[in-house]
Structures are given as structure tokens and as C-alpha cells.
């Protein structure tokens, strides 16, 4: 059996899931979600509190607070709660300037983790709906009005926004920008089949009564937003998506920071699924989430690692073959180009064609996500960097996360 034949099933599954997303976008629930009109402000407008948990966020918390105060929503129905989770920098001073603002509450507490900061904020409000916004994220003025219609159905416990990268500058940030826009398409599609398993920190909203029923946020292996989403799904509620509610977040600007962040996310997923919510995997009672989304997510981790090592094997094998063929031949001669490149004679194996098809489908979903969310700015550099580098970076955090889970290693948040 050749190494390529081992990879065929995983490439087929990747293409199948990408086609599933594209087809699901045409479903009636997805079309209706895209046609939802922003919430009409009036006497029936529900009260909302947005909690901003902060730990050493002095550089961005003011901008975050200002974006929330600029939301197109009645001031008497909107409350902003800034929670300092034991910061050691100038975050308390940056938050203090809002202490007298009529819409803002400022809370200071000892460091206990993001989930404790969120629970402290919930305890300080009686709002009907609770939103969360990371202190390095910013929202469009109409974002909240785009989100609220998602809660018309009483079974909906939470709603996610359309999240993209704030002003990407470095190549690694542009790569993540393309990835995040892909995520807009992904969340919108799987929301139509109630398959969302994480409610990201940037501007996810919850029905307060459900949060109280479920007991608030938990540690969740440093992924409290994922743990809460899985708990909501386990309880039989729905999680919706508002594709036009735009929120922008800052992302890691180096490969090292990115890998550390994604190792935390991936280990959180694996530990939550294996320790707390394994009953969701394969559960027909939970529909597409149980029989398709979660199994595919687990398979994607395994296949990503497998394809990575397959690539290393092929590169090593090719290097050895090249060395053997060129043994005894002067290096200068070996490196001298001979003849012109004719693309017609390049090897086009079935394995290569499948990989190209999967890439084209992914790039198509990125373009769909950008159009769907009306995300401004250019995506060209993001598409190029995603194509050239994403497949090489992902396995690094997949291998790291799997090793951490296998050996029981715990890493700090920062």
C-alpha cells in the first residue's frame, strides 16, 4: 500500500464536508437567516449587557468599550460591564475613565480566569441577554441589532457573530484573516443544522435564563466558550449565527504566538469532548452535530497529523533519491538548469488532483464568507498566504495539542 492511498479517504472526507457546507448554504434555514432584518427598536426591545473580561489589556480595552458604546441600541437597554481579572498592567487605569459613565459598570477582582470574570459580570446585571466581547475586539454599530432577531425562537440559547481579523498587516495575520472569513461561512452553514460547538469570545450572545439554568461559565480547560456551547447543545437548545453582525478581533502576529493559541484551543476541544461531552459524538439525538460535525472535527485532527507525517516522509524519500542519483556528480552541474519547464509533463496524480480540489473548495468558501458577511477590505493577500502556508502551520499545533493531551501536559493561558 502506497503512502498516497492512505491519504485518499481523508481527502475525500475533506472534499465531502466542504461540499456539504456549500450545499447547506442553499438550505431554507440558511436562506432565512441571511434574510433576517435587523431588530426594529421599540418598546419591545430587550435589555442587553455586554461583559468585557480583561487581563492586561490596557492597550485595547478603551477602543473596545468605545465600540460598544457606539452600538445602535437604546442607551437605557444597553449595559457595558468591564471586568478586570487581576491585571498587573495599566488596565485598571484605562477602565477607570468609564467608571462614571451611566451605561458602564467597572468591576475589579482577583485573577481567577476568564470564566470567573464572565460570571462576575453576569452577577452584576439583570439584563435579558448577556453578550461577551474580548478586550481586543471591536464591533460594528449595527452588530447588536443584527444579532437580536436570532433569538425570536425560544429554543435558541446563543448566537454567534461574523468574526474577522482587525486590520491585518503581517503575512501571518492575513493568513488568519482568510481562515476567519472561512469560519464565517462554516458557522453560518452549520448553524442551519444546529451544529455549532463553540461560541467565540468576540460578541457571542446568550439567553440569560439558559445561562442561569446551566449554572454559568466553567473553566472548560481554558476554552470556556467551547465548553458552554457543548453544554448548551447537550441540554437540547439551539445555537444560531448572525452572518451580518460584524466583529473584528486582533490575532497573534507571530507563528509562535499563533501555535500557542491554537494548541490551547485544540487541547480544550479534545479534553472537553473526551472528558465531559463524549456522549455527543455519534449521537443521532443531536442530529448533524453528533453524527457529522463533531466526528469530522476529530477526524480532521487525526488526518491533519497523518498528512503532515506523510508529507515529511515523501520529502525525505525524495531527498534521499535525489542524493543517490546525484552521487558522484559535481554539485555545480546538478544545480545547473537544463532545458525549459513544460507544465504538460508535470505529474498529475489522482492524489494531487484531490488536494487541488480540496484547496479550491476552501478558497471558494472564503470568498463566499467575505460576500456573506460583507466584510470590508481586500482578501487577496489572505488567499495567497492561506494557500502557501496554512497547510504547513496547522499540523504544528495539531501535533502539539495531541501530544499535550496524550501526556497530560497543561499549559498556561499566556
Image (cartoon, rainbow, N blue to C red):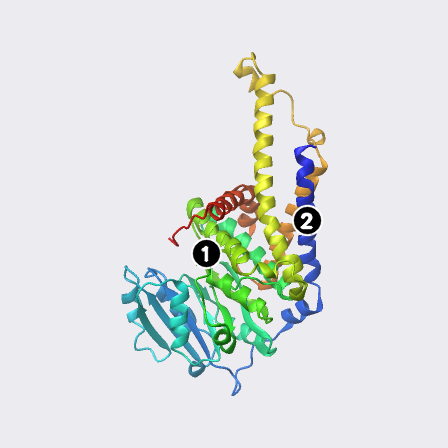
Q: Residue at x 53, y 86 (%)?
A: 44
Q: Which residue is mark 2?
A: 13
Whole-percent x, y for residue 129 in the image: 49, 77
The residue shown at (63%, 50%) is: 362
Quadrant of the image containing the N terminus: top right
As drawn, 3 above or below 125: above
Circle 1 Cα neighbour tier, 10 Å, few/some/many (<14 / 14–19 / ≥20): some
Disc 2 versus disc 1: nearer the observer: 2
Distance from label 2 to label 1 (Cα)? 34 Å
Toward the top, the furthest residue is 328
In the rendered structure, find residue 167 and report the number of the disc placed on it.
1
Q: Residue at x 55, y 47 (%)?
A: 386
- Residue 346 position in % (x across, y down): 69, 30
Q: Is residue 330 left or right of residue 76?
A: right
Residue closest to the eye, 233 or 48: 233
Q: For the residue carrying disc 2, how many other residues have a C-alpha within 10 Å: few (<14), some (14-19), or many (20+)?
A: some
Q: Residue 292 occupies which quadrant of the picture?
A: bottom right
Nearer to us in this view, 289 or 73? 289
Closer to the chain start, of discs 2 and 1, is 2
Q: Give the SS element for disc 2.
A: helix
Q: Is residue 378 visible?
A: no
The image position of residue 228, as x and y in percent, is 50, 66
Q: Secondary structure at mark 1?
A: loop
Q: Position of residue 130 (x, y in %)?
A: 47, 74
Amino acid at each position: 500500500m502506497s503512502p498516497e492511498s492512505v491519504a485518499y479517504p481523508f481527502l475525500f472526507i475533506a472534499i465531502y464536508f466542504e461540499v456539504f457546507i456549500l450545499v447547506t448554504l442553499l438550505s431554507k434555514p440558511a436562506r432565512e437567516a441571511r434574510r433576517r432584518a435587523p431588530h426594529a427598536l421599540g418598546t419591545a426591545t430587550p435589555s442587553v449587557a455586554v461583559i468585557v473580561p480583561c487581563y492586561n489589556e490596557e492597550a485595547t480595552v478603551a477602543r473596545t468599550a468605545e465600540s460598544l458604546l457606539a452600538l445602535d441600541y437604546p442607551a437605557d437597554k444597553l449595559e457595558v460591564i468591564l471586568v478586570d481579572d487581576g491585571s498587573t498592567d495599566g488596565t485598571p487605569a484605562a477602565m477607570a475613565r468609564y467608571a462614571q459613565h451611566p451605561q458602564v459598570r467597572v468591576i475589579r477582582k482577583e485573577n481567577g480566569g476568564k470564566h470567573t470574570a464572565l460570571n462576575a459580570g453576569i452577577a452584576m446585571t439583570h439584563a435579558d441577554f448577556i453578550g461577551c466581547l474580548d478586550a481586543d475586539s471591536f464591533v460594528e454599530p449595527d452588530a447588536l441589532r443584527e444579532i437580536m432577531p436570532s433569538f425570536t425562537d425560544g429554543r435558541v440559547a446563543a448566537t454567534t457573530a461574523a468574526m474577522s481579523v482587525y486590520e491585518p498587516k503581517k503575512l501571518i495575520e492575513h493568513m488568519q484573516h482568510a481562515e476567519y472569513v472561512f469560519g464565517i461561512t462554516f458557522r453560518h452553514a452549520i448553524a442551519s443544522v444546529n451544529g455549532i460547538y463553540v461560541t467565540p469570545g468576540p460578541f457571542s450572545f446568550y439567553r440569560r435564563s439558559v445561562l442561569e439554568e446551566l449554572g454559568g461559565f466553567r473553566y472548560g480547560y481554558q476554552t470556556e466558550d467551547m465548553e458552554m456551547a457543548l453544554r448548551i447543545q447537550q441540554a437540547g437548545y439551539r445555537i444560531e449565527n448572525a452572518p451580518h453582525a460584524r466583529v473584528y478581533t486582533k490575532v497573534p502576529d507571530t507563528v509562535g504566538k499563533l501555535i500557542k493559541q491554537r494548541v490551547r484551543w485544540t487541547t480544550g476541544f479534545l479534553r472537553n469532548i473526551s472528558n465531559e461531552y463524549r456522549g455527543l459524538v455519534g449521537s443521532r439525538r443531536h442530529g448533524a452535530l453528533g453524527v457529522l460535525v463533531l466526528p469530522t472535527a476529530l477526524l480532521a485532527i487525526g488526518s491533519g497529523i497523518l498528512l503532515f507525517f506523510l508529507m515529511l516522509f515523501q520529502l525525505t524519500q525524495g531527498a534521499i533519491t535525489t542524493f543517490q542519483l546525484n552521487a558522484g556528480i559535481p554539485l555545480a552541474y546538478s544545480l545547473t538548469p537544463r532545458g525549459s519547464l513544460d507544465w504538460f509533463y508535470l505529474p498529475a496524480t489522482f492524489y494531487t488532483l484531490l488536494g487541488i480540489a480540496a484547496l479550491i473548495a476552501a478558497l471558494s468558501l472564503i470568498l463566499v464568507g467575505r460576500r456573506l458577511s460583507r466584510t470590508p477590505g481586500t482578501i487577496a493577500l489572505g488567499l495567497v498566504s492561506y494557500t502557501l502556508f496554512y497547510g504547513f502551520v496547522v499540523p504544528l499545533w495539531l501535533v502539539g495539542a495531541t501530544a499535550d493531551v496524550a501526556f497530560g501536559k497543561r499549559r498556561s493561558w499566556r
